[in-house]
Image: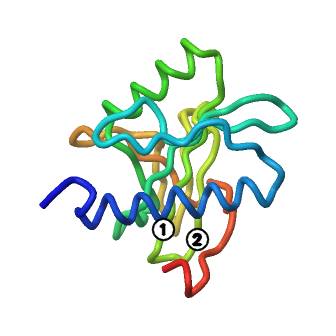
Amino acid sequence: MSWGDKIQVKKGDIGEDLVIKYLKVNGYEILEHNREVGPHPYDIMARGKKGDFIVEVKSKPRRDNYPDTGVDLKHYNDYKTVSRDKKITVFLFFVDENSGKVYGGDLSSLDVKKTHNYNNRNYEYPKVENGIIYFFQPSMSVFFELTKEDT
């Protein structure tokens, strides 16, 4: 099976296309869209009224039994490096087919360590477990909802 035939890669491509459509409809210009096979520094570079920014799209649902979602810690560190070196904002978009929503936020906002109360239980985020950095999903912005055609 080739890289492009993997289900997660196909889901990722669909997620990126949905986010690009959302950005364009909302007046952002797409400067670059990386569709390289394998690792690449970022998915999308876009431009808005406040300047250029990078978008990373993750097509994955929130974790079961936890109010969070996350990314591979190595990738997260790569995003931080790109943000620092290019002096550019990085946004994470999570395309969550289970909730039917696309949510996320600016990495520098998601990065702020904070205790969140959820269902009468306290959770501290971001947190790292088994090579994944998790962010508190209920505090993320919902960018748009998926339609039946999208899923």
134 and 97: which is toward the camera: 97
Residue 46 in the image: x percent, y percent?
68, 38
Residue sitting at 27 percent across and 57 percent down?
4
Within 10 Å of disc 1 (Cα), the crowding (few <14, some 14-19, many 20+) is many
Task: Point out which mark residue 101 bears.
Answer: 2
Residue 97 in the image: x percent, y percent?
46, 74
The CA distance from mark 2 to mark 1 is: 6 Å
Residue 17 in the image: x percent, y percent?
55, 60
Residue sitting at 64 percent across and 16 percent down?
87
Q: Secondary structure at mark 2?
A: strand
User: Three-letter amino acid code at disc 2?
Assistant: Lys
Q: Secondary structure at mark 1?
A: strand
Residue sitting at 41 percent across and 46 percent down?
134
Name the quadrant containing residue 98: bottom left
Task: Point out which mark residue 122 bears.
Answer: none
Q: Is residue 8 left or right of residue 122?
A: left
Within 10 Å of disc 2 (Cα), the crowding (few <14, some 14-19, many 20+) is some
User: Three-letter amino acid code at disc 1?
Assistant: Asp
Labels 2 & 1 near each other (Cβ < 8 A): yes
Residue sitting at 58 percent across and 64 percent down?
18
36 and 9: which is toward the camera: 36
Residue found at the very far right of the displayed protein: 49
Residue found at the very far left of the displayed protein: 1
- Look at mark 1 in the image and give the residue it sits on: 96
Vertical side of 68 occupied by 148: above or below = below
Q: Is residue 69 left or right of residue 73?
A: right
